[in-house]
Image (spheres, rainbow, N blue to C red):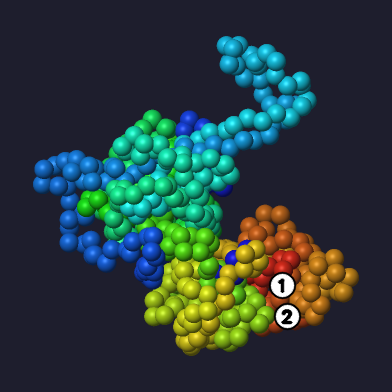
Amino acid sequence: MSHLSGRPRVWALSSLAALFLVLTLTFGASWLHQPVQAKTSPGIPALSTAVAHDGSAAMLPASGSFAPVVKQVAPAVVSITVSKVEKVSQRNMPIPFFGPEGFGAPFGGPPSGEDTERRRQGAGSGVIVSNDGYIVTNHHVIDGADKISVHLSDQRTLDAKLVGTDAKTDIAVLRIEAQNLPVLPFGNSDNVEIGDIVLAVGNPFGIGQTVTMGIVGATGRGNLGIEDYEDFIQTDAAINPGNSGGALVNARGELIGINTAILARGGGGNQGVGFAVPVNLAHHVMTQLVDTGRVARGFLGVGIQDLDPKMAKAFDLKDAHGAVVRSVQPDGPAAVAGLKQGDVIVGMNGESFRDSRELRLSVATQEPGSTVKLAAIRDGAERTFAVKLDEFPEDGAEPEHASSTGSEPRGLSVDELTPAIAQQLNLPGGTQGVVVVNVKSGSAADEAGLRRGDLIREIARHAVTNVAEYGQRMGEAGDSVLLLVQRGDNPFFIVLETQ
């Protein structure tokens, strides 16, 4: 659900090429182009303001070796060991191939069927970001741990305290009791360009600190389903299980990202596609965690979806950049400011957006209570709305973020929305529209994702209250028509085209 505002140990997503997206495992063998407003903290240094496009960040050193950079970076990257006690039912616990005594389960164990406790261990990486002991890592590295140990480059092992964690961006901050620690300086991830040389430093597979080199393959990667707020730097520098929480640095030894995930075919090993949380986003999160122990995000109070070329044409837009407002929370910040369903938000505070993901990211990084200026297109004209943001609710209760899909309009039957059907569909009182009662298998409507029980509320931005109006509006429609559909309490726009 997502009115505007990033885990299990393994994540997998299917794709056209049967690729699998896998978080860099730690348990086992091992933003956007609008700059984040830098906020200072007593414990976290400010972001660099240097522009890294003078060529020094993308060229090999004159010596042909990155050894001097590695010597600068390596001491500030740590290995992290975590453990937790879990209760395991003997009924469901598999018998190990080899127990402590050599074969089978150990003698004298609990009787079959009783619960027992076992300690689960894992390993990951982290980056020292202040000389008095603050360390940034991934949320999934320390999630659920009851003991966290940090192994320093000088061979010391120290217990760490969890300062705060944010699952939505997969960022966590730890603290160890130490002074005068080596620190990795912050770069500016807004300055990262495709083709820049980068180094990944971490503890893959728990074998010890390792450095790999690659280039930036993409920036602003999102919609991967790993986190709620995604704006990844993609790199082909080898990242493997155990690298989670480690450093992605530029050729000047500046931290530009926190290594988080890999893309792999089936297994969990490196396939040349790795992802890192940009340091600007990580800095925004870690500063709040150090200052308050939690992350407060701006909340706009709208449900949004992406545009595609068909939908842009239906809205009479020049291009498919921006985010369609598909629902407005009553009495929420956007509603108070005058935004309406069907508006297309194209910019904020003078910065344009490519899609709804960028808008969500930018709103989320604004302070609750701040006022932002949104540029939105309504009926072909651009308007400006001053919106005072609320704080994103803890439960995240808001309509789900959805991507648009193109489709054809034929192959469906509708019926009147009676009180009985409205009650069956759990629709609020006063809801109007026509109900989809049948979708022909294999039809364009079927391929578009329309389902039995969907409610069609608008056709070509005109409200539909009965079957007669539905027939009239569909008859007047040309080759494509914009529909507002509601499924449960989740409204969304869809463009239907004739077959």
Question: Where's residue 65, x and y in %?
Answer: 16, 41
Question: Where's residue 447, x and y in %?
Answer: 63, 57
Q: Quadrant of the C terminus?
A: bottom right
As displayed, is residue 338 above or below residue 435? below
Q: Are the residues flagged by discs 2 and 1 in contact, CB closer than 8 Å?
A: yes
Name the residue located 31 percent from the left edge and 58 percent from the top edge.
186
Side of 343 relative to 433 (left or right): left
How dense is the environment of label 1, judged by Cα within 10 Å: few (below 14), some, or many (20 and up)?
Answer: many
How dense is the environment of label 2, judged by Cα within 10 Å: few (below 14), some, or many (20 and up)?
Answer: many
Side of 3 relative to 28 (left or right): right
Q: Name the residue under label 2.
A: 464
Name the residue located 81 percent from the left edge and 66 percent from the top edge.
425
Question: Where's residue 57, x and y in %?
Answer: 21, 55
Q: In which quarter of the image is the N terminus?
A: bottom right
Q: Name the residue under label 1.
A: 456
Residue 45 is labelled as none
Name the residue located 68 percent from the left edge and 34 percent from the top edge.
87
Q: Is residue 267 visible?
A: no
